[in-house]
Amino acid sequence: MHKSLIIDLDESLVDFVNPFLASVNEDFGTQVRREQIRRYKFRENPEFPVKTQEEERAAVEKFGNQGGYLHLAPFPNTKTVIERLRSSYFLDIVTHRPSTSQIVQDTHTSIQTHYHNLFRKIFFSKGSKAEYAHFNTLAVIDDSPLVATEFAQRQIDVILMNAPWNTLQEYPDLNHSRVHRTFSWLEVPSRLREINQKSLCP
Ligand SMILES: [Mg+2]
C-alpha cells in the first residue's frame, strides 16, 4: 500500500504571501515586503499593520472572501513533481485556510485547475495538522515552523520549504533530525526516498 504525504497549500504549493501582502498594503497604506516577514504569525512582525489574532484572521478572511485564493500562482516545478509523487504516494492537502464557503469553493476550483486529479483529498484544519497523520503517513511538506516543530516532536518527518519566516535564528527547535529543510520542489523526491529508506531500516 502506498504511503501518504500531507501537503500544505499556501507557501508550499502556491504563492500566497506576495498577493496577501499586496492586499494588506493597499488596505493599510503600508509597504510590507515578503523578506520582512521573519515570524510565521504575521501579527508578530513589527512592520505588519495588524497586531491581534482577530485582526489577522479578519485580514486573511477578507482576502479570501474577495476571491484572493482563486488566483494564487503555483510555485515553479510543483506540478511536475506532484505528478511524479502521485505514482508512489497518496497525496492529501491539509490547509489552515479559513473555511468560509467562498474560500473552500475557490480552493477546490484552483486545485482542480492547477493540479487536476492529483490530490486525494483537501482538509481544512482548524487546529493541529498532526490530527491528520496516521500509520502510513510518511512525511509532511510545509513552510510553517510551528507545524514542522509539532510533527518533528511526534517523530514524523517534515520537508520544510525554506522561507524568511522559518529561520533557525527565530525558531531554534527546527534544528531537529526530523526536519529536512528544502529549497526547491526538485529536491523533494530524493528527500522522500531518503526518508522512506530510513523508515524501512532505521
Ligand atoms: Mg503554508
Image: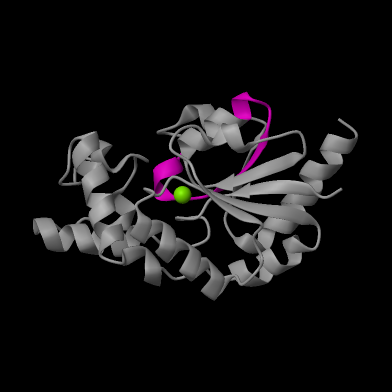
Q: Is residue 101 visible?
A: yes
Q: Indicate the position of residue 190 as horizontal and vertical percent values.
A: 76, 55
Question: From the viewer's perspective, is 65 left or right of 131?
Answer: left
Quadrant assignment for the C terminus: top right
Which image quadrant for residue 156? Answer: top right
Number of numbered tags placed on the structure image: 0
- Tell me what residue is drawn at x 52 percent, y 27 percent: 173
Above-or-below relation of 137 to 100: above
Q: Indicate the position of residue 73 as horizontal and vertical percent values.
A: 44, 71
The furthest residue to the left: 29
The furthest residue to the bottom: 113
Which image quadrant for residue 105? Answer: bottom left
Above-or-below relation of 145 to 20: above
- Tell me what residue is drawn at x 83 percent, y 36 percent: 199
Which image quadrant for residue 45? Answer: top left
Q: Is residue 175 visible?
A: no
Q: Indicate the position of residue 87 as horizontal and vertical percent values.
A: 80, 63
Magenta segment boundaries in residue numbering: 152-167
- Tell me what residue is drawn at x 45 percent, y 55 percent: 10
Q: Is residue 136 magenta?
A: no
The furthest residue to the front: 101
Question: From the viewer's perspective, is 134 left or right of 88?
Answer: left
Question: From the viewer's perspective, is 86 left or right of 1?
Answer: left
- Tell me what residue is drawn at x 19 percent, y 57 percent: 24
Camera-side residue of 140 and 163: 140
Q: Indicate the position of residue 34 as horizontal and vertical percent values.
A: 32, 56
